[in-house]
Image (cartoon, helix red, strand yellow):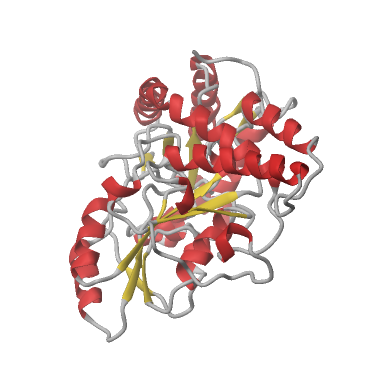
């Protein structure tokens, strides 16, 4: 059941940017508040320390259950970016990453080879095989579960099976998929999985790299014995506690995404009916149920975001981590879009609090904006 409670911003009428940050769930708020009242250090052996250690252990169990693994395989980090960097830089292997990965994967290694994708943004398995066949050192393949801009799902199990034929390690950035699609480390066949708390109703600034048993990345941070010496530094106990609570809620809420998919699909049909030259990028293949990447020719994503914002509707232009940059989406360019088209897209991402009337309002504002675009002849006259 959807609720009007727990809106992220009191001044924003409609929030359709859940892929950037999902509002913190009440259960996570309660867990964070309780953890803030604890005064011990988890590395201390006295009872205060043991109580804090128990809080961390309980959260680790909850996060592990979200992805079908054991608690010992969960390494808590400061967020998804650190977890991705730990995966990509924690092994000496040569890296192969898909062209549509998040910037925290693409920027983690200067020497990474890029795996191409097709026009729908799905990784090219033949190209991956050709890259796996080249080179002397052991490869590490990184392919995300679901794209953060388009929602397009990748054939992760096929990627893993292919990569393992060449004795490669496989990392999957599952940040956007957690809480929106079933995840199981063993079923996927990957060696590492990245999660981020604030994408599933937890707090910002905490994430996890989940590794298969027996696999230990070289730590990026050294100094203490925390996280089984895989990530030094005093634990962010309130953040970890909130992450664990959100993981429980996310696990129990997966069934609600069928309703969210119906809302999203109805929105897209109305948009395309009203504005025939609009495009839904990745709309021909399987996607996350809540995500829509809509292109509007001749109107930049930045302009669309600002227009909608003035009308009280929050969406984004591409990844929240790079939305401040007025540059074409690297994801859409990898899918074959030219620079101009790649600048003219917005991401609309729904959540469990999204109401049908909010979708109505978005469609009304967006289609009105689209219909008020200057015609091609008007645009030429304004330039002249």
Q: How many marks?
A: 0
Q: Residue furthest bottom?
A: 136
Which is more toward the observer, 62 or 26?
A: 62
Q: Is residue 292 left or right of residue 27?
A: left
Q: What residue is drawn where x is 20% and y is 74%?
A: 130
Q: Is residue 11 above or below residue 189?
A: above
Which of 150 and 256 lies nearest the eye of the viewer? 256
To which quarter of the image does residue 164 belong?
bottom left
Q: Would residue 234 be visible to someone looking at this image?
A: yes
Q: Position of residue 209 (x, y in %)?
A: 49, 55
Q: Residue 225 in the image: x percent, y percent?
A: 64, 64
Q: Quadrant of residue 282?
A: top left
Q: Position of residue 88 (x, y in %)?
A: 46, 69
Between 190 and 270, the residue placed more toward the observer is 190
Q: Residue at 31% x, 78% y: name it.
A: 138
Q: Residue at x 75, y 42 (%)?
A: 47
Q: Against 166, is 379 above or below?
A: above
Q: Residue at horizontal 32%, vertical 56%?
A: 190
Instruction: Give x and y (percent) for residue 117.
Output: 29, 60
Asked whether residue 304 is in view, the answer is no
Position above or below: 265 against 98: above
Q: Classify residue 191 by image quadrant.
A: bottom left
Above-or-below relation of 103 to 46: below
């Amino acid at each position: 059941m959807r609720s009007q409670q727990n809106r992220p911003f009191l001044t924003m009428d409609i929030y359709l940017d859940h892929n950037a940050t999902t509002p913190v769930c009440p259960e996570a708020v309660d867990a964070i508040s309780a953890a803030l009242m604890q005064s011990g250090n988890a590395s201390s052996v006295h009872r205060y320390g043991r109580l804090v250690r128990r809080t961390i252990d309980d959260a680790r169990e909850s996060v592990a259950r979200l992805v079908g693994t054991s608690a010992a395989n969960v390494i808590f980090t400061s967020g998804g970016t650190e977890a991705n960097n730990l995966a990509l830089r924690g092994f000496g292997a040569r890296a192969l990453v898909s062209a549509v990965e998040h910037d925290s994967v693409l920027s983690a290694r200067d020497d990474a080879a890029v795996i191409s994708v097709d026009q729908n943004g799905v990784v090219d398995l033949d190209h991956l095989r050709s890259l796996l066949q080249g080179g002397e050192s052991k490869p590490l393949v990184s392919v995300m579960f679901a794209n953060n801009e388009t929602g397009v799902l990748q054939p992760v199990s096929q990627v893993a099976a292919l990569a393992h034929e060449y004795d490669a390690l496989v990392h999957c950035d599952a940040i956007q998929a957690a809480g929106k699609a079933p995840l199981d480390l063993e079923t996927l066949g990957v060696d590492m999985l990245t999660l981020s708390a604030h994408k599933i109703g937890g707090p910002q600034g905490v994430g996890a790299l989940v590794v298969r048993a027996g696999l230990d990345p070289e730590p990026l941070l050294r100094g203490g014995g925390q996280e089984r010496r895989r990530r030094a530094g005093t634990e962010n106990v309130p953040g970890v506690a909130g992450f664990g609570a959100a993981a429980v809620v996310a696990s129990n809420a997966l069934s609600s995404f069928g309703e969210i998919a119906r809302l999203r699909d109805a929105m897209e049909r109305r948009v395309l009916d009203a504005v025939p030259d609009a495009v839904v990028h990745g709309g021909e293949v399987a996607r996350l149920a809540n995500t829509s990447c809509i292109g509007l020719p001749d109107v930049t994503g930045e302009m669309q975001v600002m227009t909608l914002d003035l009308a009280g509707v929050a969406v984004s232009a591409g990844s929240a981590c790079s939305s401040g940059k007025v540059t074409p989406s690297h994801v859409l360019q990898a899918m074959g879009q030219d620079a101009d088209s790649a600048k003219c897209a917005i991401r609309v991402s729904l959540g469990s609090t999204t109401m049908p009337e909010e979708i109505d309002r978005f469609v009304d504002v967006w289609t009105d904006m689209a219909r008020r675009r200057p015609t091609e002849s008007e645009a030429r006259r304004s330039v002249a």
